[in-house]
Image (tube, rainbow, N blue to C red):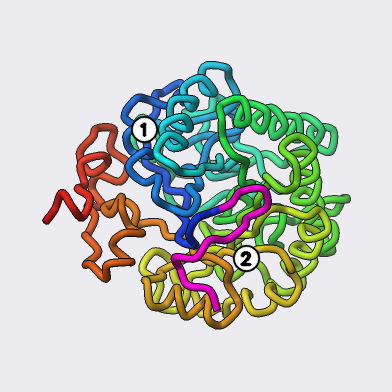
Amino acid sequence: MPSLFDPVQLGAVHAPNRILMAPLTRGRATREAVPTPMMVDYYRQRAGAGLIISEATGISREGLGWPYAPGLWTDAQAEGWRPVTDAVHAAGGRIVAQLWHMGRQVHSSVIGGQPVSSSATATDGMAHTYEGKQPFEVARPLALDEMPRLLDDYALATRNALAAGFDGVQIHAANGYLIDQFLRDGANHRTDAYGGAPENRIRLLREVTERVASIAGADRTAVRLSPNGDSQGVDDSDPPAVFIPAVRALGEIGIAFLELREPGPEGSFGSTDVPRLSPLIREAFTGPLVLNSDYGAASAQAALDSGVADAIAFGRPYIANPDLVDRFRAGAPIAPDDMKTWYSQGPEGYVDYPALAQAA
């Protein structure tokens, strides 16, 4: 079986190791969602990953409600990303852009209008806004005649990602965001062609993936799913019934890889007793499969040894360990991160974590 340090082909991308950097929202862009020079240093420092999946990046103002997160719907945003991708490539790395529409997980004070979703539902709890946390609002169901416009938004973001120098894109269809709100019956109460039966609920995922792949190429298009358990209030009564057909559809499109975020009962950032679907998905999806959530070096290698995973994506370990691959290879300790600086706007807790050689 392969080791974490062996290369793997992820569609058109040749990854030199199987230790991927998962998407991590860090809030260092401008209020106009333009990447900043600080982000160049951050991503360059982590270029040793087999592949970097960028932080979630908005496809439109409608879909991006996280303060100081970046976007890809304007020329200025694409131009802001270009120094980032150039720096990663100069350091020998590879990077894809994660395309994000948050659906109902936004607030009108950020996006300038009512949130949209599959149905007229609201998330429990509070939304992050520029004025502090505010209660989530009831979303407006997307109308059928809006679907072409939504697909156009994904297409524009994909074209901008390629123009910005990304090696491909990943469609964020997980974590309770817009596409996940269509996939799972806990949030999707529609009775039209996008609701009800599983084949209808996977329709948006399939249409978005086909549209993105028509621009980037299927071999440079990836997808992220979170099939087990509640995620930001989005859940499903029968996950295998919707996610197995979904991954079969993605396999027919020929995507570059599929990433699954699968928390367990003892998850450190979200937990669930709903069994992981990765064994069933491995049987249904023949492309490269990447697993994510609470892995360390040993458990990641065990997942490769089992044959379920082809690579592992690490999120929070990359915050404080820019050279995570080197640390795993050396068996060195993993430095802790400071949660207080996850979403702050300065360099502290962002670009000031030392590499192993610097810390010695």
Residue 5 magenta: yes
Q: Residues within 10 Å of mark 2 (few under 14, many from 20)?
A: many
Report crowding for label 1: few under 14, some 14 to 19, many 20 or more residues within 10 A (C-alpha).
Answer: many
Q: Nearer the viewer, residue 222 or 311?
A: 311
Q: Which residue is mark 1?
A: 39
Q: Amino acid at mark 1?
A: Met
Percent position of residue 205, x then y: 74, 51
User: Which residue is farthest top?
Assistant: 76
Q: Look at the magenta stretch and give its main secondary structure.
A: loop
Query: Where is residue 92 drawn, in percent x and y?
Result: 44, 42
State the residue at coordinates (43%, 52%).
Answer: 49
Q: Give left or right: position of 105 versus 295.
A: right
- The residue under label 2 is 289
Quadrant placement of the N terminus: bottom right
Read off the magenta span.
Answer: 1-14
The image shows residue 180, relative to residue 42, as above or below, that is: below
Which quadrant of the figure has residue 34? top left
Identify the residue shown where x is 63% and y is 75%: 277
The spot of residue 12 in percent (x, y) is: 67, 48
In the rendered view, would you say 174 is above or below 127? below
Instruction: Look at the numbered disc 1 and give the secondary structure of its residue.
Output: helix
